[in-house]
Amino acid sequence: MSTRPDWLRIRADFPVLTRQVHGKPLVYLDSANTSQKPQAVIRAVDEFYREHNANVSRAVHTLGSEATEAYENARTALAAHLNVPGDELVLTSGTTFGINLVAYSWALPRLKAGDVILLTRMEHHANIVPWQLVAERTGAKIKVVEITPDGSLDLDDLRAKLTGEVKLLAFTHVSNVLGTVNPVAQICREARKRGVVTLVDGSQALPHRAVDIPSLGCDFYAFTGHKMLGPTGTGGLWARRQHLREMPPFIGGGEMIKEVRFEKTVYNDPPHKFEAGTPNIAGIVGLGAAVDYLRGIGMDQIEAREQALLDIATRELSAIEGLKIFGTAPGKAAVISFLVEGAHAHDLATLLDLEGIAVRSGHHCAHPLMAHYGVPATCRASLAFYNTHVEIEQLAAAIRKTRKLLA
C-alpha cells in the first residue's frame, strides 16, 4: 500500500517557490511553460561542475570516465522511466530538436510530391513548422485533423483523413493550451492499420503522468526536460530501432562517428549517430536527477494530485462572472486557458503579476488553435503537484479584483 505524499514537504524542495514578487508570495502557475526545479536537480548540476566536469566519451582520465558514466546513467534512468531500451533513446536539447531530427532524417529523404503529413488543430508550432519546411522541399502536403467543441480531437475526422496518401501522422499527447489528453494508443493503432508512421509530442505528458512507450504503439516519441523538473536545453527522442538504423545523421561532427576519412566516414551506432558534438552534459545529468525525483514521488500520485487541483481550479474559475474556459475535454490535464470579458489576456496577466501570480498570456505557440477560437491570445494557468489549494483561491480572488479594475 503506497504512502500518501506530504505535498507541503515536497513543495519545500523547490527554492524559488519561497520568493516574493512585488512584495507578495509567488504563486507560480506557469508549469506548462517550464517547471520549477527541486533541490535534487540543482544539486546534481552543481555537483557535476564542482567535482566531475569533463567531456564525455573522449578521455580515459578519471574525470572523463565519471562524466561519461553520469551522462549515460541519466540515459538509462530516462529509458527505464519510459520502459524502452537505452540504445533507442537519443538525448537532445528538447522536443523541438527531436521533431526536427525526424523531419530531416526520416521524412525529408522519404516523402515526395503528393504525400500527406497529417497534423491536428491543437499542435504546438514545434510540431507544425518542421513539417512545413519538409513539405516545401518535397512537394508533400499538410492536412489537419479538427477538434470538437469541448477541445477533444475529432476521431471521426481523423479516420476520414487517414487516407492512402498519408505517410506521417504527428500529434500531441497532451495539448499545451487545452489540456486535452489524446488517446495515443487508439490513434496509433488506427494509423498502423493503414501503414502510417506516427510521431507523438510528449512535452506536456511526461511531467504529469506515467508514460509507457511500448504500450502506445508509436514510431517516434519526443519530449523536453525543462517541463519535467529538468534543466533547460535537455530532452530526448525515442524511436523504433529500425528507424534509427535506416535514418541518416542529422548533424555531423565529433562523437557521431566511428572512423573519418576524406573518402568516406563510418557513422557511430544509434543513438550516438544522432548526438554530434559536446552535449549539455550537466543538463542531462540534472534531467536524470529529475527523473529520479519524479519516480520517488510516483507518477500516479502526481497525476492524482494534479487532477484534484484541476477540479478545484475549474470550479473556482467557472464561478467567476465573465470568465470563459477554453478546453473542457473529459480527463484533461491540469491546464486552464481562459479569458475574462472586457480584458485583454496580456493586461490580465500583467495585473495578476502585480498580485504575485505568474500565468502565461499569449498564443502559447499555437496560432492555428487561437485562430480556430477567433481570439488573439488567452491566459493560461497550468498546475503542478507543488501547487496548493490556497494558491488556486488566490488566483480566483486576484482575477475578481483585476476584473473590477478593468471594468
Image: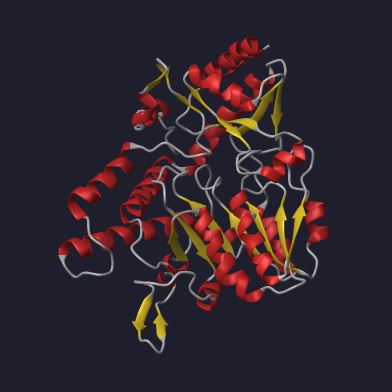
Q: Nearer the viewer, residue 32 or 343?
A: 343
211, above or below 341, in the image: below
Instruction: Please name the colour scheme applied to the rendered image.
Output: secondary structure
Quarter of the picture holding the C terminus = top right
Q: Quadrant of residue 99?
A: bottom right
State the quadrant of the N terminus: top left
User: What percent of the width, then of the height, locates residue 386?
Assistant: 45, 31
Rendered location of residue 267, percent (x, y): 41, 79
Which residue: 73% across, 43% down? 152
Q: Is residue 325 above or below residue 53?
A: above
Left or right relative to 211: residue 22: left
Total number of numbered discs in the rendering: 0
The image position of residue 67, as x and y in percent, is 25, 60
Residue 298 drawn at (x, y percent):
45, 42
In this image, 245 relative to 142: left or right?
left
Report the residue at 60% width, 39% height from top.
364
122 lies above or below 74: above
Which of the two residues, 219 or 142, is positioned nearer the viewer here? 142
